[in-house]
Image (spheres, grey):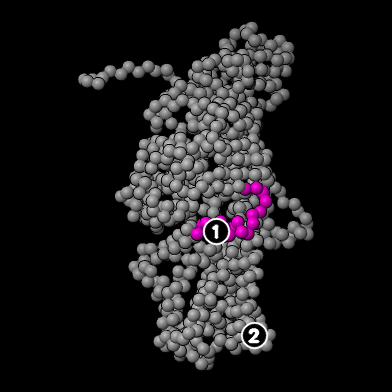
Amino acid sequence: MPFRPTTARADRRYAIDGFELTGTPDTARHLLADVWRARTLLVTLARQDFFVRFRRTSFGVLWAVGLPLIQAVVLAIVFTRVVRIQTGGNYGIYVFAGMLPWTFLSGTVMNGSTSIVDGAGMATKIYFPRAVLPLVVLGSNLYGLLPGIVILLLGSATIGEGLQADVVLLIPAVALMVLFVASLTLLLAGLHVYFRDLRFIVQAGTLVWFYATPVIYPLDLAGGTLRTILLINPATGIVTMFRAAVSNTGTSGLAPAVIAAVVWTVVLATAALVLHSRRDRVFVDLL
Amino acid sequence: MTIDPDPDGEQAPVADFGDDDELLGGPLPEPTAAAPTGPPIIVMEGAGKRYVKYEDTPTLMGRAVALRTRTKRSQFWALRDVGFEVHAGETLGVIGRNGSGKSTMLRIFAGVTSPTEGRVAVMGRVAPLISVGVGFHPELTGRENVYVNGSVLGLTTREIDELFESIVDFAELADFIDTPVKFYSSGMFVRLGFAVAVAAQPDVLLIDEVLAVGDLRFQAKCYARMQELKEAGATVVLVTHNLQATRNLCERTLVLHDGQQVFLGPTPEAISVYHELLTTAPRGGTPATQKTETLTPVESITTTLLGPDGARTAYVHHDQPVTFRVAVRFRAAVERPVYGLLVSSANGVTVYSESTELKDGIGRVTAPGEVTVDVRVSPQLVTGSYEARGVVHWGSTADERVGSRAVSFYVSGRRLVHGVADLHATFEVEAIGQP
């Protein structure tokens, strides 16, 4: 036998995992500990999910750089040569800075909200916190975000307004975005197990949401009630923060929008935690 | 993210423990039901699992309607009031008919789902072999999939690094480890999955029908590995319809019926209880042979199986005589009845049939009443499940009435005998040259 001899349980080298289940729902703290313990799984699956897309393609991972690059170039051309909106700086960079977080948000929410149901093949056979499945989508999209951020920084350093100290805002911007998107996706993924209509509601909602977020137009274009609505929209805070990191212009309403996004995040995170800690082990019954 | 381990569906070769004697190359004693000694590893206390019937799962629209009409969703208990302990180093068999709650129990043991009521505790790491190769991605290489599958099973990257070599050795895939698994044969696929699952010294092995691990030689290797883990104190739960496997591997066996724990104890008794359940609640509806009651002089035929001690049983040894007691209730006189016995295998093949001769005066029925026929048999059959039913003819063979209720029983046959009939062969082996 090529295996190490296993003489006694006392010899075992790996932590003894075990579990106790009763009909009562779990605590949020317990769930968080479980998710933390499953971090290897989370990272492995996220990396697999991201990199497996480029298997057997000629250009491989270059596509991860190529796609956002092409998007940036197209936006730069369209919004400096075709559509002209005066914001002071390079409008192409301005739109790309908004497009980047938006693409991450909408992509993660759309794929992540169905992830528990999509992962039934695995989830019905072995236990891991179901919250891992939507988080894998988020993690995978984070890999995809990285080249986009590099392109954004390069673009703003060359054809934009140049990089200033404000660029550190990217760190809280990414953090806020990840927390918000994680909370929303976790909540939707849990609810989707019970209400399968949610898949289409999310698809339709994201469409509306895009235009309700100042991605391809500046916030200042809207006034009155419309501006208030845009400020309450959590995506506005995230998008505006990304912009503030690479541009001095078009960042009005940053503070209220960010506060709104933080409040949304706290509310959604609480709801997601409650849902997942109560339902984690019984989602599978409906898969 | 692709999760389905086998994109073409249930393609894995379903081998099983059936021909264990062959694959182990030697006779295997039936495990004795020693009193469990080790610490409890799996504990179930009053555990139950309730499901909502799938077709009643509410949609948003359905909910809105239900609010008004107050329709109750139908629920059923897949498992109810189950309580037992499985100890370290023990192998527990779980048998029961389809829908008896076996899968639900396995899911609970795997921690996949939580019981609705009661308590379930599993002390230690579980390797659900029901999930061999879960998380395998066809585009990834064997090496990459070992890491994915290992992390699904709860190992850290460092732990997988340490185990990697032994996993590849065990799976015998050193030459193919950097090939995408979609080019693997299904045997290679399962070998790798099994190797990962057992690599991490699991405390609990959950095994169902699919010990579909390649060829016989690899199965023997898996079996040896299981024994090794058992000797090291691992607990094995085997859920299968294969009673031979259960009999050969399990000290104790649990019988489930309609979600209830019917019996827990020595495997032969469990197998007997299981067959009695098959007898009392036969599969399918009314037997096709049943004729219109009013036209026949035979009202009912009941067959029971009595062991050597005269007590009812459903588990018999090939070398111990048993008695089939056929009770025939006549509603009219029959001049020349013929009594017979028909034994068929689990898949419906008649293995044996014999009857009394067509003579005047044997068991002649002059008035309505009951006739008891004791058929003494030496059940020299091959190990397996069988059914027996009493048969009565009268007049011509067209007026035949076969006992509608068959008695199910299990025969523990001679070791190393397989096939349909036990011919009691003797082997004379003569060596040519120097042995």
Where disc 1 sits, the SS reads: helix
- Magenta highlight on residue A32: yes
Q: CA distance from mark 1 to mark 2?
A: 39 Å
> Residue B148, image x and y in percent?
44, 55
Looking at the rendered structure, the kind of residue marked 2 is: Arg
- Chain of the residue displaying label 2: A
Q: Residue furthest top?
A: B361
Q: Which mark is residue A283?
A: none
> Residue B395, image x and y in percent?
63, 15
Q: Which residue is mark 2?
A: A227
Q: Which residues are magenta?
A: A21-39
Q: State the residue in front, B242 or A31.
A: A31
Q: Is residue B243 above or below residue A94?
A: above
Q: From the image, which quarter does the C terminus of chain A lie in?
A: bottom right
- Magenta highlight on residue B387: no
Mark 1–mark 2 CB contact (< 8 Å): no
Q: Is residue B157 above or below residue B128?
A: below
Please name the residue shown 38% across and 51% down the image.
B162
How many other residues sit within 10 Å of disc 2, few (<14), some (14-19) or many (≥20)? some
> Residue B236, image x and y in percent?
51, 38
Q: Which mark is residue A35?
A: 1
Q: Quadrant of residue B253?
A: top right
Q: Residue furthest left?
A: B433
